[in-house]
């Protein structure tokens, strides 16, 4: 690739414009909220999985 990597400023601008066109400006806050909730749930499930194995792997 000429000029660097995938995430050049122009690439990010084009991606953001496509997202706004595809989803519409009124749906972006809900989209961001659901994405954030999904990430939080995923992280908490991963950290919860570590707690489940703290007994050395013994089954009850």
Image: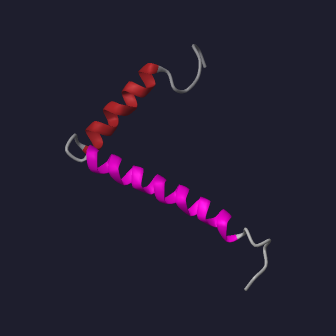
Residue in the picture at 51% in, 26% down: 7
Which of the 4 image quarters holds residue 15?
Answer: top left
Up the image or down, 8 lies above or below 52; here it is: above
**Residue 8 in the image: x percent, y percent?**
49, 21
In the picture, measured across the screen, residue 27 lies left or right of residue 47, that is left
Residue 34 quadrant: bottom left
- The one nearer the camera, 29 or 41, is 41
In this picture, residue 59 sits left or right of residue 48: right
In this picture, is 34 found above or below 16? below
Work out which residue is located at the far top of the displayed protein and give it: 3
| 10 lies left or right of 52 | left
Which quadrant: the N terminus?
top right
The image quarter containing residue 57 is bottom right
Q: Is residue 17 above or below residue 56?
A: above
Name the colouring of the figure: secondary structure
Quarter of the image where the C terminus is located: bottom right
Q: Is residue 51 magenta?
A: yes
At horizontal 67% and vertical 63% (from top left) the residue drawn is: 50
Name of the residue lying farthest toward the bottom: 60
Decide which of 23, 37 is in the foreground and name it.
37
Is residue 17 found left or right of 58 in the rendered image? Answer: left
Helix, strand or loop for the magenta stretch, by majority? helix
Residue furthest front as drawn: 55
- Vertical side of 46 occupied by 53: above or below: below
Which region shows up in magenta?
Answer: 28-52
Residue 46 position in % (x across, y down)? 60, 60
Task: Tell me the residue at 53%/59% (across/down).
Answer: 44
Q: Total label count?
A: 0
Check if residue 12 falls in the magenta segment.
Answer: no
Which sits in the foreground, 46 or 30?
Answer: 46
- Please give the name of the residue rendered at 72% of the width and 69% of the height, measured from the top-left corner: 53
């Amino acid at each position: 690739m000429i000029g660097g990597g995938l995430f050049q400023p122009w690439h990010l601008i084009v991606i953001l414009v496509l997202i706004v066109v595809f989803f519409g400006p009124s749906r972006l806050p809900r989209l961001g909220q659901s994405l954030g909730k999904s990430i939080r749930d995923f992280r908490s499930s991963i950290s919860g999985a570590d707690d489940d194995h703290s007994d050395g792997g013994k089954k009850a």
